[in-house]
Amino acid sequence: MCGRYVSTRSPQDLAGLFQVTRWDPRETLAPSWNVAPTDQVWSVLDRPDRATGEVVRQLRQLRWGLVPSWAKSVDVGAKMINARVETVTEKPAYRRAFAKRRCLLPADGFYEWRTVSAIGTAKAYKQPYFISPQDGRTMAMAGLYEFWRDPAVTADDDQAAWWTTCTIITTEATDAAGRIHPRMPLAVAPADWDSWLDPAHQDPDELRPLLTAPADGHLDARAVSTAVNSVRNNGPHLLDDAADDQPGA
């Protein structure tokens, strides 16, 4: 799975990188070295303009953890942070979003954990690894988004009733990521962003080939500080080398 990632690029940078034509500069998100489920995250998506019908590329904040339109509570989103590519076109929670509501989720890289066995008096622990493109470029993780209306909110406050949520599509991990964890996020190459985001492009057999390993599999994986294990911690120090961070060090 992909349960934590890093996203530090500014909205201005993301707007330029993804050729965004609409975003609200009043919307801000602090750089995060520990993006966690239920956090607000930056997304890139194409949506028709309500007035003109023209499809516009937008930079928007979404809540990580997809909530299907038919869900009874937003709480289900915490369990739906990933959609497996093997079943994404079959499961009711994801199949309509895969056909019509696809997005890109920018990331510097993502975390996975490997259990380190107990040795002598040292206890077993989970060692986090930061996995990122070797060339340092921003990853465009493949995502889906969905709209959910909170039935507890009255019609007089309709705008506050709507939640927009997302999930990350994952696959079997390979190369550097595969040595750490069996799953990894999928990405979309820049040449395929337009096709992936186009809401009119709805053929699953044509969409699946657009999904690739991040950085075409050219990834680095390095052990980092165990401070990232807690979602309460944040900051660039989470990417510090793990050498001085081990139990008993």
Image (cartoon, grey):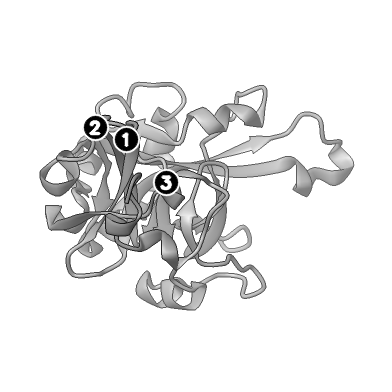
Residue count near mark 1 (Cα–Cα under 10 Å), binned few <14, some 14–19, many ≥20:
few
Q: CA distance from mark 2 to mark 1?
A: 5 Å
* Residue hosting label 1: 122
Residue 68 appears anywhere in the view: no
Please report contact status of discs 2 and 3: CB closer than 8 Å, yes or no.
no
Which SS class for mark 1?
loop
Quick check: 133 above or below 179?
below
Residues 192 and 123: in front is: 123
- The reply to whether dot 2 and dot 1 touch (C-beta < 8 Å) is yes
The amino acid type, in three-letter code, at marker 2 is Ile
Q: In terms of secondary structure, where does tag 2 sit? A: loop
Where in the figure is residue 216, as x and y percent of width and height?
A: 13, 55
Q: CA distance from mark 1 to mark 3?
A: 26 Å
Mark earlier in primary sequence (2, 3): 3
Task: State the residue at coordinates (51%, 41%).
Answer: 37
Residue at mark 3: 4
Tell me residue 187's x, y (percent).
26, 51
Q: What residue did someone put label 2 on?
A: 119
The secondary element bearing badge 3 is classed as loop
